[in-house]
Amino acid sequence: MNQVNIAVIGTGRMGSVHTRNLARSIPEANLVAVCDIRLEVAQAIANELGIWRVVQDYRELLADTSIDAILIATNTNTHAFIVKDVAAAGKHIFCEKPIALELAEVDEALAAVERASIKFQVGFNRRFDKSFQRVHDLVASGDLGRPCILHIVSRDPEPPPVEYARTSGGMFIDMTIHDFDMARYQVGEIDEVYAMGKVLVAPDYASVGDLDTTIVTLKFKNGAMGVIDNSRQAVYGYDQRLEVFCSNGVAMAENERENTTVKAGGDGYHSARLPHFFMNRYAPCYVEEVRRFIECVRDDKPVPATGEDGRMAIVLGHAAWKSYHENRPVKVSEVG
Amino acid sequence: MNQVNIAVIGTGRMGSVHTRNLARSIPEANLVAVCDIRLEVAQAIANELGIWRVVQDYRELLADTSIDAILIATNTNTHAFIVKDVAAAGKHIFCEKPIALELAEVDEALAAVERASIKFQVGFNRRFDKSFQRVHDLVASGDLGRPCILHIVSRDPEPPPVEYARTSGGMFIDMTIHDFDMARYQVGEIDEVYAMGKVLVAPDYASVGDLDTTIVTLKFKNGAMGVIDNSRQAVYGYDQRLEVFCSNGVAMAENERENTTVKAGGDGYHSARLPHFFMNRYAPCYVEEVRRFIECVRDDKPVPATGEDGRMAIVLGHAAWKSYHENRPVKVSEVG
Amino acid sequence: MNQVNIAVIGTGRMGSVHTRNLARSIPEANLVAVCDIRLEVAQAIANELGIWRVVQDYRELLADTSIDAILIATNTNTHAFIVKDVAAAGKHIFCEKPIALELAEVDEALAAVERASIKFQVGFNRRFDKSFQRVHDLVASGDLGRPCILHIVSRDPEPPPVEYARTSGGMFIDMTIHDFDMARYQVGEIDEVYAMGKVLVAPDYASVGDLDTTIVTLKFKNGAMGVIDNSRQAVYGYDQRLEVFCSNGVAMAENERENTTVKAGGDGYHSARLPHFFMNRYAPCYVEEVRRFIECVRDDKPVPATGEDGRMAIVLGHAAWKSYHENRPVKVSEVG
Amino acid sequence: MNQVNIAVIGTGRMGSVHTRNLARSIPEANLVAVCDIRLEVAQAIANELGIWRVVQDYRELLADTSIDAILIATNTNTHAFIVKDVAAAGKHIFCEKPIALELAEVDEALAAVERASIKFQVGFNRRFDKSFQRVHDLVASGDLGRPCILHIVSRDPEPPPVEYARTSGGMFIDMTIHDFDMARYQVGEIDEVYAMGKVLVAPDYASVGDLDTTIVTLKFKNGAMGVIDNSRQAVYGYDQRLEVFCSNGVAMAENERENTTVKAGGDGYHSARLPHFFMNRYAPCYVEEVRRFIECVRDDKPVPATGEDGRMAIVLGHAAWKSYHENRPVKVSEVG
């Protein structure tokens, strides 16, 4: 057997998902250690899964030459410097998104990755959704002609607390980042963005300068145009749809439902809500993205979501904020 | 212009629908007269539509050699003898279903039609529904392989008054007749039926020996099997679906909805009821069936729903009642 | 009976639809005359429908005091001056959209209407679609909370010839006008628009300065935002959808289909195209809008689509063109 | 922690699914051993999952007092005697369906279970499907009124080899057994069955007296009626639907799809196949049914699919065969 030895740094919300997936559902990986500055958090999941090595300081892992790869799922503000350290140690990296909020930090981290010639994958989980992939494949096949209009609907079920918003980079960086990446995955490079937004459902967001409802329009370099429609409050569940309208047809990914039951009565037909939580909706993607990363490390193949992909999503987020503040279309090249 | 001169006998519920359609939507026809034993009923619709000739006794129409065809939409118990008279007068006939409740009467009427060598079409409106036709064409094309299982769901929104049930021929004759014809239209001749039924929603139906909920299974001569599922009370609307499952695929006609609006809230997705009334659901079919009849008269083509079709539906209805009463499968040949 | 006497001016494509509807399906109206500068066109439909009076010059109708109302369905460039004449004659007006391409002309026509104190309705047929109305009613009821994001998809099946584009006012006036009106109908007054567009499917459109694929974003005065997504070429049919996303839910109108048949085979499920033609898709709306107009005339009620509605759609069209040419958001107040 | 110690006997197709689920996804269980008469098969999965104890003869496990429960997933013809041995050893049992093909064997096994006073659950996985459960809950709530018509569609994607059919008990026992159980789960006890069937897609099935296409109608003791529609060849995937039509509405479970992508082109709309394989479609149910069993053992609660449920499904299968052979409705009480 040719397993990849991997350790997880950060076993919080996302990190624990990855840890369980690595332990249970990715036989190509050998999960050798978990790390969290809250040692008891790492210890708990290690106990649950029978992982023998638990550390509090990730630097302990770097010297261990038996470790091939590291999955980084710590707080966003620590991603960049951990990436630099891990890259310096020559280990392959799977890094949760975003790489960093500030472009300078992103660039420093990616420079370190470059120097180390390691695999570096960013956690854009939605690229691994079977329905979005099917749309991508249909469009990429050329059978539908040229892409004309991309439309992404991406709405969270409920707003996170305003404290979260304070340090998240704001809606365009925190939330739209996924949609910017999806837009590039489906249609290609973006030339210009125009962003509008409002606080309509979470009044306290105004106090931290964030938004809860936004529309971003895109001009792609290939002539196509796009719209990203985001909200922090879709009471009917986590609304995740997209549509690529082309000169010779259209490909759409519709929502998944909690179940397929339909009830009909005197007042019409009723069917189920959408899955409420992103971890639920995208559960198979979290497995698949890491499985693919492990495979790329093992077989020395290019990763499916690169550092450049991670960087461009941040660039687009900043361009959107600039567009919003200046109320004008902004060229992506103005930002980075 | 080469119009067909037609008169309508019986301008009640169905007759008034046909009368309006002939006047407004079937330019191939020239509606020259209307007739009803309730003269004022005929007069009212004649006024509405600007029809000049109104008669109370249909026999007045028979001598008029300018009249090419007659549409009969009187009470069921008068169909057969009017057919005989009209046939004797050599006029083409469109007759509402059923031709008669008793097979002997049906046979007499059809013998008169035979002797007169006229066109005779029975009002099996559902054969003219675009979705059912599309299913028929898909199955008939052979692309789906051989038919294996037919399933028809046909449920009324609410039971008619028990007085109606008293003279209607009962569920298998009154209601299932349409489905027997649809079964033959979609899959072919039927060899054997087995029927079960209950009074579950309209308790007073028991007092007249009728049923409100029934299942009839079919064995077709070509080896396929079928199920007809009927109810007199679908509170969510007039439920009209069918499915022809074949060795190489399936063709289904789904329900139409009152509108395409979908509302989603915290408790899931809500969409519209089905159309409540058969006249609403099948409105275009009532136009099309008569338009086709007019065309067949004008161009001397075979009609799309024949006297034999009308007869077989009655035979199957009686076979179903026999099966129900004896609780055993009944060969169609036992009845007629 | 209290019928409204009405004449139709212009019996071309749209005019003949209205003429047939008035004659066949709107008993509240008495269609007394038809008029077309191509007399033979008017005569043909008059023969078909049994209308006795046919004129070539619409001015002949103005002196006839028995005529209560006029439906104008001539070429767009004649709407405004015919409106002025008819208004001066004191007859109520149903005018096909757009009132005129230039705002000055619109304003002159509306001033004449104002002076005459007549009913004036503009032909925004989509306001009468049962599904769009249901969305409107759901949103207006307040049950869904406040509107946040409107999304309209409105795509034609195929581009009209470039000659048509030459005089149509271009995409934002010719096509988006319906969507601007729908946006105002669903969510309210618009404060600012931003428009982008391309020639992606009909290359010769570039030669006349028109577009075939456009996205317009909207900021409403009530804080909501919107997107209108238009294309001249949806090969799967006439794509007409909308969605009003609100703080407490969402209301959507989905497409109608040519039929409800579904076929499934080894390669998955197949269902029908959309209706190909707008006259087909919106057939019941053309009846209903004129029926409502007749009713408003008869009962002296306010019309459901006013001159101001017609004017605002033109203003928004010009604002969109300005935004497109200057590549910046444009306040509606900059235009009119 | 209060885990239940469990061993798996039989690690073939179904057994390996259960083994992996126990090891990875059911933390309430402690999987202590696997057993297969093909020792190398058991050893392989034990290696994969890190299970220490592997035996070839299940009797070795019976003496081990640390083992609380046994999951039996061996060949059908061995279920009954293994059940008797395990019951005699006083261990709780989860047994794959069917308990046995012959009723006498079933009864002996259940008598042993009875004597031992152990938990005994049968592997009716579909009872644990979220959509079927939702239908059950809607119907059981009484909000839909009384059940009138149950309809189950249950079609396999392709026929198993005829060798399989030779020993499977035939269509009504092998395949319809799941649907009989579902019928009882949704609506209640069955009084009478009528079965028809044909060989339409797998001609060699005729040589072993089996069928590939069947319809079974049901009369329930509570007055409701039902239909089970089975085929061994649905080329569009594993077709699993049901509908409970009630006096005050209907509850339906629709199919799941491979993905939610829709493509539209000039020839209409295309969407994905159904999942092809039952293990795929019902994957979460296989976890949930065993998790529930473990919970019932741990907390001494009644199991959700009892020995009596297992027995009744076999009784109904034999009644269906009897009905088919004699072409008449058969009372369940005639068989057992």
Image (cartoon, coloured by chain):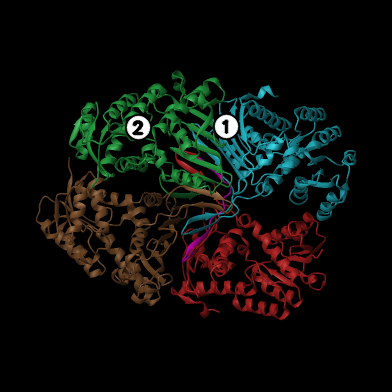
Chain colours: A red, B green, C brown, D cyan
**Could you tell me if residue D78 is visible in this image?**
yes
Return the x and y of residue D84 as percentages of the image width and height.
Answer: 83, 32
**Count of marks placed on residues:** 2
Return the x and y of residue A324 as percentages of the image width and height.
Answer: 47, 71
**Residue D229, quarter of the rendered image:** top right
Give the answer, above or below, for where A309 lies relative to B109: below
Q: Which residues are magenta?
A: A245-263
Labelled disc at residue D226: 1
Who is closer to the viewer here, B199 or A82?
A: B199
Give the answer, above or below, for where D315 lies relative to C194: above
Q: Residues within 10 Å of mark 2 (few under 14, many from 20)?
A: many
- Compute the Cα span from label 2 to label 1: 32 Å
Give the answer, above or below, for where B41 lies relative to B288: above
- In the picture of the structure, the residue carrying the numbered disc 2 is B96
- Say which element carries label 2: loop
Q: The disc labelled 2 sits on which kind of residue?
A: Glu
Return the x and y of residue D7 as percentages of the image width and height.
Answer: 83, 44
Does the CB distance between marks 2 and 1 fall below 8 Å?
no
